Amino acid sequence: MDETEPLASKLCASCKEMKPLSEFLRRTGRRSSTGSRRGACWSCRKAKAAAAPLPDPIDHKQKAILRRAQAKKPSTSPPMPTIPLPNDSAALKKTRQGTVWMRGKTDKGRRWYQEIELELAVILVNEHAAVLVNRHTIRRLFSNKEFRRYILDRDNHTCFFCGEYGDTIDHLLPRAKGGHTTPVNCVCACHACNQSKADQDLQAFMKNEDSIT
């Protein structure tokens, strides 16, 4: 028999019987060639398909009810790690340059950035002048004009020292001695008290005022 002549029959992989090639499904794709056929005959394939259980008819309404019921079940996933609050300065970390980024806006709305020391960033957050953006960045809450307006409105334009009308802002701990422009360290003051206090500490100024009166 000529070796190039294709075989007229094939052994079925399921029933192990020799059957004509016409009883087998033709292969497709890379493995396809003249006379190439799949392993199981048509009869075995039909018998296997008949023995397989029929799929249940799709009930879309029931599936929708099941989806809603699953959505109402409490999640069994592990709880997410606690995210620090915006005023939690303990979350601040230095950048590779050893500083912290601070950003804000000018009175005209222009954005600015600058690098500051970690200690200053912690003070600004703790004294409610800034909030955390991320562990390397804080954001100032007020521009210069907004901060002045906030302090005067908060204190109802009443001088912290004498109780008279005030329209200026004074630092309880002077900036020359390490104080910062924050809501905690700033109060409304009248012009006379602001000039008299100058760079004195609060205790020293109040003591001098009491001795004068």
Image: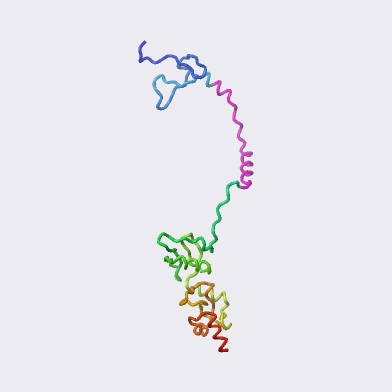
Q: Which range is magenta? A: 46-74
Q: Position of residue 187 (x, y in %)?
A: 54, 77
The N terminus sits in image quarter: top left
Location of residue 59 (image quadrant)? top right
Residue 82 vs 150, above or below: the answer is above
**The C terminus lies in which quarter of the figure?**
bottom right
Q: Name the residue: 46% across, 22% down.
A: 38
Q: Would residue 54 be counted in the magenta stretch?
A: yes
Relative to residue 106, is residue 210 depicted above or below?
below
How would you classify the magenta stretch by its main secondary structure? Answer: helix
The residue located at (47%, 60%) in the rendering is 93
Residue 120: x and y, percent?
47, 68
User: Is 84 situated above or below 189?
Assistant: above
Q: Residue furthest top?
A: 1
Residue 156 rendering spot, x and y as whole percentages: 58, 77
Q: How is the image coloured?
A: rainbow
Taking depth in this image into account, of 52 and 137 the one nearest to the observer is 137
User: Is residue 52 shown in magenta?
Assistant: yes
Percent position (x, y) of residue 16?
A: 50, 16
The count of marks equals 0
Front one among 119 and 2: 119
Query: Which residue: 53% across, 62% down?
Result: 88
